[in-house]
Image: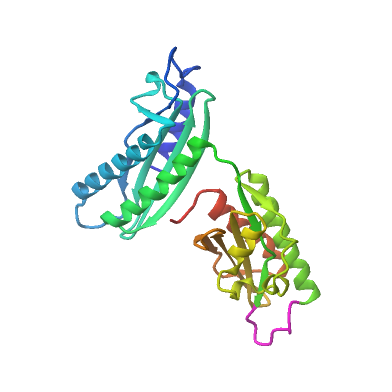
Amino acid sequence: MRRSLPVFLAFLLLILPASHAPAGAEPAIGVAMDDFSYTDTSAEPANQTAAHERRLSAFMAALRRDIDADRRYRLVRSIQDGAAFKVIGGIQKTSTLVQWAKVAVIDVGAKKVVMDKLYTFRGDNDESWERAEIFVSREVMAALGTPAPIALAVFEFELDDNTAAPAAGPTAADASYLAEVTTAVRDTLGQAGRYRIVDVRGAREDAVKNRALRDCGGCDAAIAGQLGAEQSLIGVVRRVSRTEYTVGFQVRDARTGTVVSRGDSGLRMGADYSWTRGAVRLVSDRLLDGVAQP
């Protein structure tokens, strides 16, 4: 499935008609969606074909119902029936507890892929499939609607020094590297177009000034809201030793304080100057490139 979907995408873009809207088409935007494929490569001894077919059928029914419930869209059978967008995808079970979902949305008129993401979800029961459908549905709807960029407050990355004899606080060199990390992450997210980076220099709270947002119980969300942001991002570099570190981040909804995304790089080897590379790769993988975890 992972190899076949990109090939099918390329082929589909070649054969799409130049125009997708017939004369007199109703205002609602047409969306065509084929049933997703399913592949089980987990090598489990039990034959679960019937259960997988039932869950996939329920997944597709719910996804179509979510789209059809939005009056901006109407489901159509095919591109020839006036679809402005085509949704395709497939699900692969890779192990007992891990499944992948590959989903793409194509703008038919522009012959352009507007979304192409790989998701991973844990579990293989009705509840895990329902959670995955809710997450995928939200992402597909966002791609169809081309939403405005999310206003995101990216606060300065903080240092959590777990070495045997940490300094009283970040050294001048540490502060310089942390500033590089923060700037690089802001630039990466801002340039991607999905986020509008909010200026946080107006924040005067002690947790911000003392670089202690990681220990404030989620106060970053309220601070971000006061700055006009929709979401907040805090990041932490954890120094395990002089040559080992981890990078983590957490994103909260500024209105509710709910954690909407988080990521951790796991242990990495490298000197302080490699913090930036690790942080940029982490946020790119988790927030931009679609390896998302609902």
Q: Can you give x and y, in whole percent of width and height, for residue 231 in the image?
A: 58, 56
Left/right placement of residue 259 relative to residue 232 reads left
Q: Can you give x and y, in whole percent of width and height, for residue 282 in the image?
A: 58, 58
Residue lying at the far front of the rendered structure: 226
Q: Can you give x and y, in whole percent of width and height, for residue 37 in the image?
A: 32, 39
Q: Quadrant of residue 155?
A: bottom right
The residue lying at 43 percent from left, 13 percent from top is 24
The residue lying at 75 percent from left, 72 percent from top is 174
Q: Is residue 277 visible?
A: yes
Q: Quadrant of residue 61?
A: top left
The residue lying at 33 percent from left, 58 percent from top is 95
Location of the N terminus by quadrant is: top left
Q: Quadrant of residue 123?
A: bottom left
Q: Which residues are magenta?
A: 161-170
Between 20 and 243, the residue placed more toward the observer is 20
Vertical side of 190 occupied by 36: above or below = above
Left/right placement of residue 226 relative to residue 69 reads right
Location of the C terminus by quadrant is: bottom left
